[in-house]
């Protein structure tokens, strides 16, 4: 039995942050019912990755909405709203990421829902909180990466701002949302009362950067100083940290004793014995390491350096990753199937409980696919 089995979650969220939280709750055993507009459904169904679609919904939608049910309802329709309120009366958790004021207009704000269900856990995600001049601005991942300073932490100095190739603001906010909901479940168990859980994309993406922002606030307001050598990585870490091209493939070097690494590579780095130079002369040192590492293959250096206990690794692309034995040994992939019998391969929950992998075989639902069954169970 999974820990959240028996809990019903009503998900009014769209795109990534809220639905990714719902995915995690579903993996933990909760029954997650997406409340979607009729016909078109949630907006993410048409937001595609590389124009990939399955059963008229984007592959992106399928990656974060597996193992859920769909109940189609028009929240502006009084009759549909009556049905939704009946679902709320029997739910444990409801989540939404509408802009501030939307749920208030239709009578589904937190205080309204408490009159329907006094024990409801009510979770909201906003872009920038629900107060102030930013409250109604669009909260989108790239905009948050740009606003929060995050885009100045990756890539080389000469590239200037570089956004991540993933929706990191959305996904980390989803993680924080799950943490808040789990904490609210514990609070409700103690008090027997409903709980309001609030997170914003802005606060979440700032929390992700706590080490960088703390450094800035306590170091005289010094901006992150990225290296400008190919393969530069962490803006706050010294040489040798980074990725290096070899004769064949790429090698990553993590933190370690620079002089010891120099000895292993047969490079004289004695003039950098002062550890302060490992940062101030970071680019210069990395150039020396790069010249040496280009003389042999990544496999050669990996074998040599790992034998000496130096933290290093080969840089894999997705094809190379997929061919690693641990992918099958750890069952890192799973196959899900929709109601039409179409199959998709995807990742699984990274959590194991008592040795059990939290896998699932159910793909994302079609719009309103579960209306009849949900109506019979909860509303009739």
Image: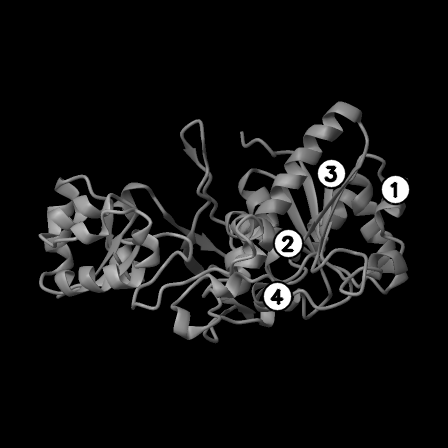
Q: In the picture provided, is 193 more to the left or to the right than 209?
A: right
> For residue 147, which numbered disc appears in the image?
4
* Residue 349 in sight: yes
Q: Which label sits in the foreground, 3 or 2?
A: 2
Q: Which label sits in the foreground, 4 or 3?
A: 4
Label pair 4/2, CB-CB below 8 angstroms: no
Residue in view at x 69 percent, y 60 percent: 127
State the residue position of label 1: 116
* Residue 339 in sight: no
Tell me the SS state at disc 4: helix
Tell me the SS state at disc 3: loop
Of mark 4 and mark 2, the one earlier in the sequence is: 2
- Residue 328 on image: x %, y %: 28, 46
Q: Which label sits in the foreground, 1 or 2?
A: 2
Tell me the SS state at disc 2: helix
Closest to the observer: 264 or 360?
264
* Distance between mark 4 and mark 3 Cα atoms: 35 Å
Of mark 1 and mark 3, the one earlier in the sequence is: 3
Closest to the observer: 5 or 280?
280
Q: In the picture provided, is 72 more to the left or to the right than 328?
A: right
State the residue position of label 3: 92
């Amino acid at each position: 039995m999974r820990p959240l089995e028996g809990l019903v979650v009503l998900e009014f969220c769209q795109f990534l942050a809220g639905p990714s939280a719902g995915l995690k709750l579903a993996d933990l055993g909760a029954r997650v019912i997406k409340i979607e507009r009729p016909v078109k459904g949630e907006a993410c169904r048409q937001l595609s990755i590389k124009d990939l679609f399955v059963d008229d919904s984007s592959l992106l939608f399928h990656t974060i909405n597996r193992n859920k049910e769909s109940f189609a309802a028009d929240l502006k329709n009084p009759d549909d709203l009556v049905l939704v309120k009946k679902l709320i009366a029997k739910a444990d958790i409801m989540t939404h990421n509408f802009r501030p004021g939307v749920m208030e207009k239709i009578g589904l704000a937190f205080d309204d829902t408490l009159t329907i269900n006094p024990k409801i856990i009510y979770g909201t995600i906003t872009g920038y909180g629900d107060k102030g001049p930013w409250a109604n601005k669009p909260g989108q991942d790239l905009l948050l990466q740009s606003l929060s300073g995050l885009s100045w932490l990756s890539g080389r100095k000469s590239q200037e701002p570089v956004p991540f190739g993933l929706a990191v603001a959305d996904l980390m906010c989803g993680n924080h949302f799950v943490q808040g909901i789990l904490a609210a479940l514990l609070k409700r168990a103690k008090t027997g009362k409903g709980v309001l859980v609030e997170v914003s994309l802005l606060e979440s993406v700032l929390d992700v950067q706590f080490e960088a922002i703390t450094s800035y606030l306590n170091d005289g307001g010094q901006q992150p100083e990225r290296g400008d050598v190919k393969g530069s990585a962490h803006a706050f870490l010294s040489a040798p940290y980074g990725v290096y091209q070899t004769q064949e493939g790429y090698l990553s070097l993590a933190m370690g004793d620079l002089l010891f690494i120099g000895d292993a590579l047969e490079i004289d780095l004695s003039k950098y014995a002062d550890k302060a130079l490992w940062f101030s002369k970071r680019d210069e040192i990395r150039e020396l390491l790069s010249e040496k590492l280009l003389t042999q293959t990544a496999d050669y250096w990996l074998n040599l350096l790992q034998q000496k206990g130096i933290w290093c690794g080969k840089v894999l692309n997705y094809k190379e990753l997929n061919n690693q034995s641990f992918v099958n040994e750890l069952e890192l992939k799973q196959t899900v199937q929709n109601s039409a019998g179409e199959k998709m391969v995807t990742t699984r929950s990274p959590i194991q409980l008592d040795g059990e992998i939290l896998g699932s075989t159910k793909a994302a639902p079609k719009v309103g696919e579960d209306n009849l069954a949900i109506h019979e169970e909860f509303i009739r």
